Image (cartoon, helix red, strand yellow):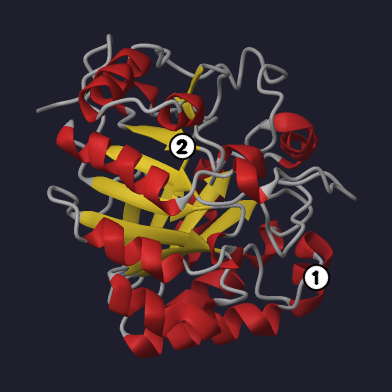
Amino acid sequence: MSLIDKYNRTIKYLRVSVTDRCDLRCFYCMPKGFDGYEEPDDWLNYTEIERIIASFTRLGVNSVRITGGEPLVRKNLPDLITRLAALPGLDDLSLSTNATQLGKHAQALYDAGISRINVSLDTVNPDKFNEITQGKLEKVTNGLLTAKAVGLDPIKINMVIMKGVNDDDVEDMVEFCMNNGFTLRFIETMPVGDTGRNAIDYYIDLHEIEHRLAQKYELIPAVMKGAGPARYVQVADTNLKIGFITPISQHFCDTCNRVRLSATGTLYMCLGDEYKYELRTILRQGVSDDELDQIIRDAINLKPLKHEFNEKPEKVMRFMSMTGG
């Protein structure tokens, strides 16, 4: 079976948030002083998450990424991973994390069925890292090295580029990833919520970054396995691949293959829009599997043709940690 929206896009990729909580406070993601988290009783439990993902896999989705908030702050996450890894048709199960707790959990995640991870890391300068996140860089680097040691591969570093904040760290991050065997992906800032709209003042077109890197490195076209929208190049004579994710300067809406499930069971059809469908209530009212499959088919038709980050940056009121990474 295939899950196809009204614009004839096949949905193959589901991003699932297991919590809206995070142990870092990146200023472009979460408002300063925010403590309005959802209550754990309002989160989907692991059985509910498994039911929803099983429905998506029956409908043809074969790639799932576990996200947050920070997913590793939710207790017993490897138990959920083990259950999901056993679902028929789920070919790709991955995790996004800030890596602060990865040192403690990498082996259990790998054993449960996570093979690859994405790590949010905007600088390798300890002082600047603290300014951006209010956290300690050494926890992240320890988590990364532990993940590498247990066999997680590839490890992709996601760096949000911000003018005047970390754009001068680009070359240092390239060298860091090159030296450690990580993949590097640059991401443009997006106006998601008030925090994101404030961060859009730091926006840089990633084509400028690519041009800058081409002055120092020989970049050749490359491809890399994954369900996301990154366009890749490779630094010649090295194993380093660099991806560019450009939702603002060159959006990829016409080939968008993903939807997002929040920790509380809200299915968001587009990161840059408010189209959504609430699944938690119907699950707790006893919906059957066949009914759930049909509801998801109907919900997918709410997916818009494209986001309006450029035309209506004020449109999305929720902030990123509420949506899921």
Furthest residue in direction front, as rendered:
286
Q: Residue 26 falls in which quadrant of the image?
A: bottom right
Q: Quick check: 149 left or right of 91?
A: right
- Tell me the element at label 2: strand
Amino acid type, callout 1: Asn
Camera-nearest residue between 179 and 260: 260
Furthest residue in direction top, as rendered:
6
Camera-nearest residue between 211 and 245: 245
Q: Which mark is residue 130?
A: 1
Residue sitting at 19 percent across and 50 percent down?
90
Q: Which mark is residue 144?
A: none
Quadrant in which the N terminus appears: top left
Location of residue 73 in the rendering, given as x and y in whole percent from the top left corner? 61, 66
Location of residue 182 in the rendering, given as x and y in whole percent from the top left corner? 41, 74
* Residue pointed to by mark 2: 261
Q: Is residue 101 above or below residue 116?
A: below
Q: Is residue 27 above or below residue 311?
A: below
Q: Quick check: 314 left or right of 65?
A: right
- Tell me the element at label 1: helix
Location of residue 294 in the rendering, given as x and y in whole percent from the top left corner? 25, 18
Residue sitting at 83 percent across and 65 percent down?
131
Q: Residues within 10 Å of mark 2 (few under 14, many from 20)?
A: many
Amino acid type, callout 2: Leu
